[in-house]
Image (cartoon, rainbow, N blue to C red):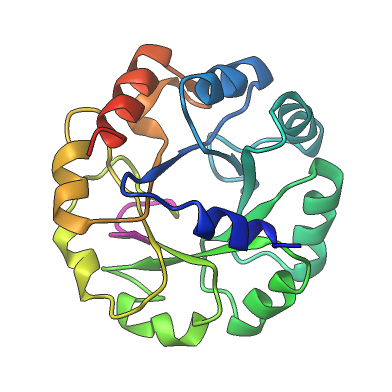
Amino acid sequence: MLSDASIIKKNLGKTPWVKICGLTDPENALECVNLGADAIGLVFFEKSPRNVSIQRAAQISKTLPDHIFTIGVFVDESYDRIMEKVNRCTLKGVQLHGNEPPDLVDRLLKENLLVVKALFAAKEPLLAQAYRYENASFFLIEYGKGGLPGGNAESWNYELSLQLKTKKPLILAGGLHPGNICQAIKAARPAGVDVSSGVEKNYGVKDLNKVKSFITRAKSR
């Protein structure tokens, strides 16, 4: 049987898959999926305004169709704390968004999880340090400026992601929104795109008109 990571890699097409990140409401998450989102990101980082409780994350996962990838976003968390949330929230993948040790990627892969490792153009782990995490399922690329881990709604030179010399599929993130997604995809040619604040109504709740516009434009490439 194919692992979750193998399934999503096998199904990669000419248009990027779309992850809507930072959801906190089950109905809102389902509506994003109905508009064409391929993955939903749930943030488990207390300093984030989109931080979600285990109970709410479990509700969101339970609401979504089985084929949707629910991905927990973690920053420098331990294996045990990550796996607690994976099991209680039935997550299919994890996104490591800090400066985690490379062996954590390997341990999580053994749990048959999709493992996304974030790399940054402006802070560690840098794009040039991708070799440390060579077993990750995907690399998520963003600039890395601002007060919080994540894009901080800051657009950047997306062509910098091409400096990453790897055969791994790339997910582009950071400052994406309906107005720049086509240009960003053209510049970076990613396998997937990740958006949060660029389609938001308020923290943790997405504006469905923006979500629809974003997904339509991303998948029209």
Q: Residue furthest bottom?
A: 131
Does the magenta segment cover residue 142? yes
Q: Position of residue 30 (x, y in %)?
A: 61, 21
| Residue at (42% x, 35% y) in the render | 196
In the displayed structure image, the side of residue 189 where residue 89 appears, left or right: right
The residue under the point 62% across, 48% down is: 71
Q: Is residue 122 left or right of residue 160?
A: right
Residue 9 position in % (x across, y down): 51, 59
177 to the left or right of 84: left
Which quadrant is home to the N terminus?
A: bottom right
Magenta highlight: main SS: loop
Magenta-drawn segment:
141-148
Q: From the viewer's perspective, is residue 61 above or below residue 111?
A: above
- Give the image quarter of residue 54: top right
Give the residue displayed 39% in from the left and 68% down from the top.
Answer: 119
Residue 113, relative to residue 150: is it above or below?
below
Q: Name the quadrant of the C terminus.
A: top left
Residue 34 belongs to magenta span: no
Along the viewing direction, whichever of 169 and 21 lies nearer the viewer: 169
**Nearest to the observer: residue 116 or residue 4:** 4
Number of numbered discs overlaid on the protein picture: 0
**Picture coordinates of residue 65, whole percent (x, y):** 69, 29
The part of the image, by quadrant, that contains residue 127 is bottom left
Instruction: Give the image location of residue 132, x and y in percent.
Output: 48, 86
Describe residue 161's horizontal placement relative to residue 47 as left or right: left
Residue under the point 34% across and 76% down: 126
